[in-house]
Image: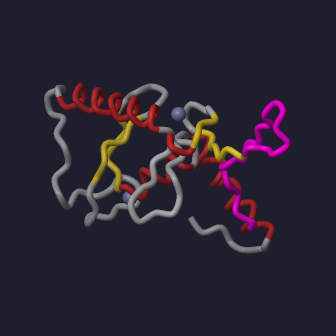
Amino acid sequence: MGKITKQVLIVNYLINDDEPTVVKQKKCIHCKQLRDMDYFEKKKHERNHRNVCKICRKSNLRKLNRIKKAWLQIPGNILPVLGTACEVCGRTDKKLYFDHDHSTEKFRGFLCRTCNTAIGQLGDDVAGIMSALGYLIHAAKRNGDAVVV
Ligand SMILES: [Zn+2]
Ligand SMILES: [Zn+2]
């Protein structure tokens, strides 16, 4: 165990039924709704279901495409060519993805999938990243280690 899972077990006691019915549900990290598991797709070769429900994924994708299309219509804005560095890790051998701020809906930059996912998982904002950074610095100090930047 030890691993925190967002999956929750909901036990429904039906009227006049001694046996509880166990329905497996999961909370969507986007809409915060508890939904049945069939609302969460499973990626190929992955054990876990997605954390965002089908409904949110669909509307997020539509929104992303709209923002990307509008951005591409601005003169001078072009998609990065192969070999362009990720704005976070600097790797040049990765495919880059259009990253935008979900609250302002503004384009942020082009990132590799790993960096884009990592930022998203830390809350997709400065507060989330700062919190993780603060944790690392605090942990290093507690261990008496130098903070390497
Ligand atoms: Zn959702
Ligand atoms: Zn990167």
In the drawing, does residue 108 fall left or right of residue 76?
right
Q: Nearer the viewer, residue 31 or 139?
A: 31
What residue appears at the point 26 percent right and 57 percent down from the top-left corner?
95
Magenta stretch: helix, strand or loop mostly: loop
Within the magenta stretch, is there residue 16?
yes
Residue 88, x across and y down, in percent: 41, 55
Within the magenta stretch, is there residue 55?
no
Q: Nearer the viewer, residue 128 or 113?
A: 113
In the drawing, does residue 103 fall left or right of residue 5?
left
Q: How is the image coloured?
A: secondary structure
Position of 37 relative to 61 (above/below): below
Position of 132 relative to 59 (above/below): below
Judged from the image, the quadrant occupied by ligand 2 is bottom left
What residue appears at the point 50 percent right and 45 percent down from the top-left corner?
40
Residue furthest front in the image: 16
Residue 149, x across and y down, in percent: 56, 64
What residue appears at the point 68 percent right and 72 percent down from the top-left corner?
146
| Count of residue discs | 0
Residue 33, x across and y down, in percent: 61, 32
Specify the segment rendered in magenta.
1-21
In the drawing, does residue 25 fall left or right of residue 143?
left
Residue 74, x across and y down, in percent: 18, 26
Position of 113 relative to 2 (above/below): above
- Looking at the rendering, which quadrant does residue 84 occupy? bottom left
Q: Could you tell me which quadrant the N terminus lies in?
A: bottom right
What residue appears at the point 51 percent right and 63 percent down from the top-left corner?
47
